[in-house]
Image (tube, rainbow, N blue to C red):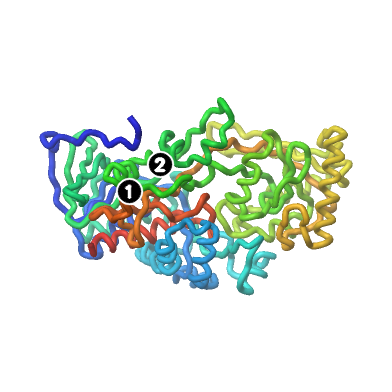
Amino acid sequence: MSWKDMPEAIPQDEISEVVNTDIVVIGLGYSGTAAFRAAAESGARVVALERADEKHYSVWGRDIGHINSKFLESRGVPKIDPIVFFNEWMHRAANRANPELVMTFAKRSGENFDWLTDMVEDMSAVRVAFWEEGIDNRYSREALKGDFSLNGFHYWYGTAQFPGMFGDHRFPSLTQLMLMNQEKAKLLGGEVRFGTSAVQLVKEESRVCAVIAKDAQGRFIRVNAAKGVILAAGDFAGNQEMVNDLVCDVSDLYMPGEPQRKNTGRDGSGICMGVWAGARIESRPLPAMGGNTVTLMGVCPFGAVWLDGELKRFCNEVFGVREIVGIAPNQHVRGRMFNLYDEHCIENELSFSVPCHAGFDPAEKGAFDNINALIEYARTHDDGVYEMETGPANGPSKRAKKKIFYGKTPEELAKNAGLDQTETENLIDSINRYNSFCEAGRDEDFGRDEKLLDPLTGILFLQENRPPQIGSMMVTVGGLVTDGKQQVIDEYYKRIPGLFATGNCCGRRFGPQYSTPIAGVSIGMAVTLGREAGINAAMA
């Protein structure tokens, strides 16, 4: 049986309880919680169904990306023209995203962030990622002048970073913030049913009118929805069949016989229920965070020169950053690759780091500790190799030791790294060729932005990096096709009355990959569009 196949309807005689309401929200993550509160504030009767039990309820993450909030203004973060922001988003999405949804986010994310946090009296523990008022580095000096781009991609400050992640609930963690918003909705008459999983949607003629759910005791409940059902049940990265079918550019990258990666993420049940009700899924491949990218991580995580196993440069290392540039090595010759950088990387490359998803944050405490320790060691020792522990500081996994080779000349670096004659010649040629482009201010091989064309001089570092395997994704960010109010569209491009989709159940928000002009927009968009979905459903 395929995930697309609708299961048999739950017989009426197995229904233990019938509940009548205006709106049913399926899932209480970021988008579902926002929809729950917004619908209640709009005067609707709302029942929210959440699979997790109340005791173990939590959400994952810490960053809410948005623009032009009062919070950001209070921290001195410059405002962004929503039209400019919108055009950058659509540029990254190759115009595949729904323009109405993206413009809604561009224009309303700030006010919706302030709304979400309006009950938090003390926001002092919430920092703006990548930003400190008066921060002075190469990026900020240029970015704060106005328009800034790197190889045609624009970046801005706008990420509220909350304390606590992965179960750490220092106040105000995002888990606590979601619970506070749920309490607001409950004060207005909203009802939450924890430990209750939605199973099927019920249609009468063309309209979705109810949800069949199963509670913690295994009883079936029918919740009738006079106005509509909002699918906010998350993504499908945890459903391998759906991933293979819908994120097909990832499955296409596997080698014959290569085992597929198991991913974190939801099971796609919300999207499945929409499909069973006749909903259309956005055109493949659906976007995800990761999966079809390879990132060459290292102590110098931004702006390093990338070399392949033959010690030859093979791409523009800063084109689009992380998700976009990571597509370049995903079909390159497999095996080891290298990061190449020098003792000036802090004042050159790292001080030009852009604020983006998984970017290097120069404003974070201890951000430069590892690279400073490496450089200091290389300046005071002549053994040519530095061993650095990597991996989690606590927990069952052992911290591995990674070797970073260094030398005062390309020849010394090659010798210390144990390269053979051909590899040594390739390394020296790669360094000399790259430096000639830096001197000319023009990368003739791969078009690297001249802002990040700094010659490799002084002590040189070479860090081997066996790329992570293809297929590992954090979450999928594609789903059901909707109109601009997040009402779901069917296979014949008509609206399905009574059915809305938001968060990672909602499609056409990104392009072929999760690529962001600010960090944290996955949660930020979930909050903004979740609230809008709740309002739209209540007004239906």
Residue 432's mark?
A: none
| Cβ atoms at labels 2 and 1 below 8 Å apart | no
* 397 relative to 324, above or below: above
Nearer-the-camera pick, 205 or 530: 205
Q: For residue 113, say whether it is visible.
A: no
Nearer-the-camera pick, 429 or 97: 97
The image quadrant where one finds the N terminus is: top left
Left or right, residue 306 beside residue 193: right
Question: Residue at left 48%, top 48%?
Answer: 287
Q: Position of residue 47 (x, y in %)?
A: 22, 52
Question: Residue at left 62%, top 34%?
Answer: 399
Specify which label sits upstream in the sequence, 2 or 1.
Answer: 2
* 425 relative to 33, above or below: above
Q: Which residue is mark 2?
A: 236
Whole-number angstrom distance, CA of label 2 to CA of label 1: 20 Å
* 115 relative to 182, above or below: below
The image quadrant where one finds the C terminus is: bottom left
Residue 491's mark?
A: 1
Q: Position of residue 54 (x, y in %)?
A: 29, 44
Left or right, residue 227 beside residue 97: left
Nearer-the-camera pick, 34 or 400: 34
Tell me which corner region of the image, top left, top right, bottom left or bottom right, holds residue 411: top right
Q: Position of residue 310 (x, y in %)?
A: 77, 37
